[in-house]
Image (cartoon, rainbow, N blue to C red):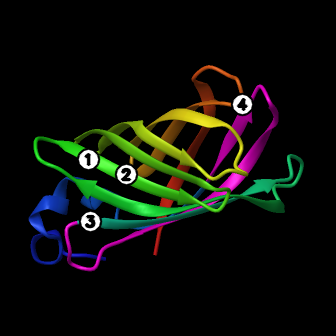
Amino acid sequence: MFNLDQDIPEPLRPLAWLIGRWEGAGVVGYPTIESAHFGQEIEVTHDGRGFLKWESRAWILDSENGAKVRPAAVESGFWRPLDNGEVELLLAHPTGILELYYGTMEPAKIQLKTDGVLRAPGAKEYNAATRMYGLVESQLMWVMDMAAVGQDLQSHVSATLKRVE
C-alpha cells in the first residue's frame, strides 16, 4: 500500500483513493445489444509524476454460473488532475476509439463527460458519454451513460469493484 504523505505528489492526492488494483462485476446493456453481466479488473498506478495510469479489462460472464464467456472491453489511459477540483481522463480503446473526458472531483467522487471523441474510420459510431466514479463503503462504484449508433445519451454500464492486494 502507498503512504499518502510520502508517496503521492500533491496534485494527485484528490485522486489517491483510485490507486490500487480493483476487481468486481457489473451489468452492461444498450438498445443495440443484449444485456449481460461482466467481470472487470482495473489497475491504477503512478510513477511519481502528476498523473495516474489507468488499465481496465472486462469480460462477459455466463448468467447461470458466472464463468468467463469471452473478452469484452479493454481501455488504457491517464487521469490528469487540474486546478480547482477539475480532472481529465484520457482513454484509448482497441476498437479505434479515443476519448477525452473532463469533469470535477470531490472527495471520493468524480463526475466526467466527454470533451472529445475520435473514431478510426472502421470504428462504430460513438458520439458522447458521461461517467461517474465513487468510493462507497470501500468499494469503487461507477456508471457510464453513452450516446452511440443512433441512440441518445442513456445508461450503458455500471459496476462495483473491491480493492484487492
Q: Position of residue 47 (x, y in %)?
A: 27, 80
What residue range appears in magenta?
Answer: 25-50
Q: Position of residue 104 (x, y in %)?
A: 26, 38
Q: Quadrant of the N terminus?
A: bottom left
Alpha-carbon neighbours of circle 2 within 10 Å: few (<14), some, or many (≥20)?
many
Give the number of the disc on residue 87: 1
Snapshot quadrant of residue 153: top right
In the foreground, 2 or 45: 45
Q: Position of residue 13 (x, y in %)?
A: 17, 59
Q: Which residue is mark 2?
A: 89
Badge 4 vs badge 2, beta-carbon distance below 8 Å:
no
Distance Cα–Cα, label 3 vs label 2: 10 Å
- Of the image marks 1 and 4, the number of the one nearer the N terminus: 1
- Does the image show residue 107? no
Snapshot quadrant of residue 27: top right
Distance Cα–Cα, label 1 vs label 2: 7 Å
Distance Cα–Cα, label 3 vs label 4: 32 Å
* Element type where label 2 sits in the image: strand
Between tags 4 and 2, which lies in front? 4
Amino acid at dot 2: Leu
Give the number of the disc on residue 51: 3
- Of the image marks 4 and 2, the number of the one nearer the N terminus: 2
* Element type where label 1 sits in the image: strand
Badge 1 vs badge 2, beta-carbon distance below 8 Å:
yes
* Residue sticking out furthest to the right: 64
- Of the image marks 3 and 1, the number of the one nearer the N terminus: 3
Please name the residue shown 80% across and 54% down the image. 61
Q: Which residue is mark 4?
A: 149
